[in-house]
Image: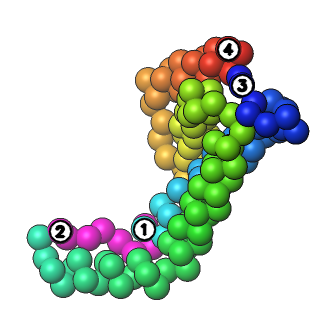
């Protein structure tokens, strides 16, 4: 990994990547809870769409989720100012791993063996990429 400034270390860059990805995952979880609280939208019905959009902009969970995404993006920009994109971007795959685990633990979602195998393969890819 190439660190672009003299004061930044690869450990600091990796820590910032993990923080950014973790905050994005938290934002996604909060958005999921907010969307579930609002309910499904019927895209063929304008009144349903209008109600859904109003509920989105007035939902504290949705607003918190979007704020978390915004914070994650700011931290990501700091990462991009310090390291090569070819190193940083594959690390975003950590979000797939975290999301699967947290969806199972916090949302009680059923996770098939195939998904666990896929996440194991993704984890191996992130490990290989991080060592290059």
Mark 4 or 1, closer to the camera: 4
- Disc 1 element: helix
Q: Label 3 belongs to which residue?
A: 2
Where's residue 90, x and y in %? 56, 29
Q: Earlier in the sequence, mark 4 or mark 1?
A: 1
Q: Is residue 59 left or right of residue 123?
A: left
Query: Do the residues under discs 4 and 3 have CB atoms within 8 angstroms?
Result: no
Dot 2 crowding, Cα within 10 Å, few <14, some 14–19, many 20+: few
Q: Decide: few, some or many residues near mark 3? Use Cα within 10 Å; few <14, some 14-19, many ≥20.
A: few
Q: Residue at 71% of width from left, 25% of height from top?
A: 2
Residue highlighted by disc 4: 132
Mark 3: which secondary structure?
loop
Between marks 2 and 4, how big is the CA–CA gap? 46 Å
Which residue is at the front of the view, 84 or 103? 84
Q: Is residue 74 left or right of residue 12?
A: left
Nearer the observer, disc 3 or disc 1?
A: 3
Q: CA distance from mark 4 to mark 1?
A: 39 Å
- Give yes or no for residue 118 being in the magenta stretch: no
Which residue range is magenta in the image? 36-43
- Quadrant where the image shows the C terminus: top right
Residue 71 appears in the rendering: yes
């Amino acid at each position: 990994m190439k660190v672009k400034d003299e004061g930044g270390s690869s450990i600091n860059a990796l820590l910032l990547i993990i923080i950014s990805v973790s905050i994005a995952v938290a934002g996604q979880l909060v958005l999921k809870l907010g969307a579930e609280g609002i309910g499904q939208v019927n895209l063929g019905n304008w009144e349903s769409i209008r109600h859904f959009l109003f509920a989105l902009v007035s939902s504290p969970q949705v607003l918190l989720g979007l704020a978390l995404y915004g914070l994650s993006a700011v931290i990501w920009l700091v990462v991009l100012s310090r390291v090569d994109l070819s190193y940083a971007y594959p690390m975003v795959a950590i979000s797939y791993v975290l999301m699967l685990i947290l969806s199972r633990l916090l949302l009680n979602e059923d996770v098939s063996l195939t998904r666990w195998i896929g996440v194991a393969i993704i984890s191996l890819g992130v490990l290989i990429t991080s060592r290059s």
